[in-house]
Image: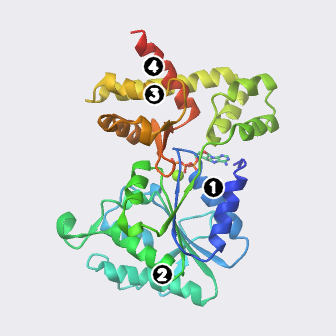
Amino acid sequence: MKFYNREKELNYLKTYCQLEPNSILFVYGPKSSGKSTVMLKVIEELNKGDDIIFFYYDLRRYATPTNEEFLEIFFEKSDKKYLSNKFEFNLKVFKFGIEENFDFNNIKLNNVFDKIYEGIEAVVKEGKKPVLIIDELQKLKNIYFNHGEKEGKSLLNELFNLFVHLTKVRHLCHVICLTSDTLFIEEIYSNSTLENTSKYYLIDWLRKGCVRDILKKEGFTNEEINYAINYISLPYEIVDLIENKKLGLSVEETIKQWINIEKDKIKYLMDTTELDEGEIYNILSKFKDKININYYTEVKKEEMKYMQFLIKNEILFYDVINGIIKPTSVKKWNAIKELINIYKNK
Ligand SMILES: Nc1ncnc2c1ncn2[C@@H]1O[C@H](COP(=O)(O)OP(=O)(O)OP(=O)(O)O)[C@@H](O)[C@H]1O
Ligand SMILES: [Mg+2]
């Protein structure tokens, strides 16, 4: 599998892992921008040394977990405080250990947190640096311990307290959380537990110059590059373009297919929602002549419902830190522009 560019992002994250832990890091960005891939590359490269121990959990692998499943994902029964995660074949990453007789069905959240703490302390005592990485963290959102949703404790909120303690208070362990859910980032951003305790890092689209260089190296002609450059923003699009070229599809054909699929997805969404079609088109029309809009000056309160619908369905990406809303990809932007034209002439 090829890995394109991302030098800046790799350097940032590699350096970050080696600094003293001071805050929780949230890595966010448009759908499929390459967040998980960059993080895995960081683990792979830093694993060449032997001073960092990565506790890595990719929650996308699992169906939305229940309490017991959360415990089974995070821990493994063992007499060690931490141990290698044997489910990750190609990756040297670790899991927290828990005693053989620990009863997963009858536990208190504090006991669970003690186990995480003990695992991390064991790493530190060995003179190594623990780094805890959770991908798709928002999947833990609806887990409650003790007595169900009303009286129970939200796992995520309690975890955030633990993470603040591990980072900002005790400087023991890095905590890096990745998410593709930007509305979740907004929730986190306004969560008072995390005020002054979190950092945010955006993994965004590939820059135009970078796309141009990659396509050139991959042997595309200038004509092909000049055409493709107006549509590509995500790494997997380059992979798809190369693959399709081998399969006999021209750059133009591949891109036309992409746009048609995107248009179809948006139209299907509009046809199956209860929300007013005209209002949704009004929101999309904001992107008629530009790719970004400013959340603070260009979105009215009464438009938020439609905007959130488009963000939730990954048509738009809301960058809460920079106050910007844009389509999730340049390809999506082109599909949106074509749809607006069709709607206008209806
Ligand atoms: N730098 C890269 N070079 C080559 N391929 C890449 C690169 N980054 C990502 N990809 C490919 O793009 C696809 C999406 O990447 P990835 O899953 O890392 O994105 P993501 O931002 O984590 O997505 P999501 O928002 O769904 O979590 C994958 O098929 C991956 O292999
Ligand atoms: Mg991901």
Residues packed near mark 4 inside 10 Å, few (<14), some (14 to 19) or many (20 plus): some
Q: Amino acid at mark 1?
A: Val
Report which residue position mark 4 lands on. Answer: 340
Residue 86 coordinates in the image, percent (x, y): 55, 70
In the displayed structure image, the side of residue 341 where residue 47 appears, left or right:
right
Q: Amino acid at mark 4?
A: Ile
Eye-nearest disc, 4 or 1: 4
Q: Earlier in the sequence, mark 2 or mark 3?
A: 2
Report which residue position mark 3 lands on. Answer: 286
Q: Residue at x 34, y 68 (%)?
A: 157
Q: Earlier in the sequence, mark 4 or mark 3?
A: 3
In the displayed structure image, the side of residue 256 where residue 226 appears, left or right:
right
Residues packed near mark 1 inside 10 Å, few (<14), some (14 to 19) or many (20 plus): many
Eye-nearest disc, 4 or 3: 3
Which is nearer the eye, 139 or 209?
209
Look at the numbered disc 4 and give the secondary structure of its residue: helix
Look at the numbered disc 2 and give the secondary structure of its residue: helix
Query: Mark 1 vs ligand 1: CB under 8 Å?
Result: yes
Q: Please say if the residues under marks 2 and 3 sit with CB atoms less than 8 Å apart.
A: no
Q: Farthest residue in the bottom direction?
A: 125
Q: Earlier in the sequence, mark 2 or mark 4?
A: 2
Could you tell me how far apart the alpha carbons at marks 1 and 3 are, in whole angstroms?
32 Å
Could you tell me how far apart the alpha carbons at marks 2 and 1 are, in whole angstroms?
28 Å
Q: Amino acid at mark 2?
A: Val
Please identify the quadrant where the C terminus is shown.
Answer: top left
Q: Earlier in the sequence, mark 4 or mark 1?
A: 1
Q: Residue at x 45, y 59 (%)?
A: 59
Report which residue position mark 1 lands on. Answer: 38
